[in-house]
Amino acid sequence: MSVIVNLRHAAEAQVMRKKMTDHMAEAVSGFETIKLYGLKQWWMAKMSGLQREYLHVGNRAEAVAATQRR
C-alpha cells in the first residue's frame, strides 16, 4: 500500500512539473503577446498558483515518506 501511495505522489509531482514546464514554454512562445497586451501579472499569478500546487503535492509526499520511515 505504501509503495502505491509513494508512486501516486510521484506521479502527481510529475504532472505538476509538466504543467509548470508547459506554462514556461507558452511564455517563451507567446512572449510578444504577453508583452503587447500587458499580461505579465496574469502570467505570474498563474505560475504562482502552479508553484503553490506543486509545493502542496511535495509536502504531502514528504509527509508520507516521513511517516513510512518511522
Image: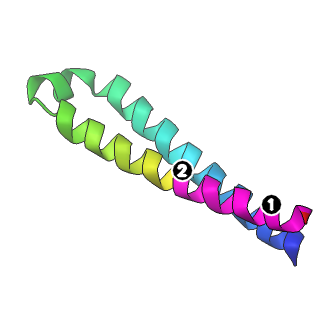
- Report whether 23 appears left or right of 9: left
For the residue carrying disc 2, how many other residues have a C-alpha within 10 Å: few (<14), some (14-19), or many (20+)? some
Which region shows up in magenta? 55-69
Give the x, y percent position of residue 52: 44, 50
Total label count?
A: 2
Residue type, mark 1 in image: Ala
Give the x, y percent position of residue 8: 73, 66
Point 16% across, 34% down: residue: 39
Residue type, mark 2 in image: Leu
Point 19% across, 29% down: residue: 34
Q: Residue furthest left?
A: 37
Out of 48 and 66, give the one closest to the viewer.
Answer: 66
- Dot placed on the residue nearer the N-terminal end, 1 or 2: 2
Q: Main secondary structure of the magenta part?
A: helix
Q: Which residue is mark 1?
A: 66
Q: Residue furthest front?
A: 70
Looking at the image, do the residues carrying marks 1 and 2 touch, with CB atoms under 8 Å apart?
no
Q: Is 63 situated above or below 31?
A: below
Q: Which residue is mark 2?
A: 55
Give the x, y percent position of residue 2: 86, 73
Q: Is 5 situated above or below 40?
A: below
- Report whether 69 appears left or right of 17: right
Q: Judging from the image, what secondary structure is the residue with disc 2 in?
A: helix
On the image, which quarter does residue 18 sit in? top right
- Report whether 53 appears left or right of 28: right
Point 43% across, 30% down: residue: 25
Look at the image and say whether residue 24 sits in the magenta stretch.
Answer: no
Quadrant assignment for the C terminus: bottom right
Q: CA distance from mark 1 to mark 2?
A: 16 Å
Give the x, y percent position of residue 1: 87, 79
Q: Is 60 situated above or below 36?
A: below
Q: Judging from the image, what secondary structure is the residue with disc 1 in?
A: helix
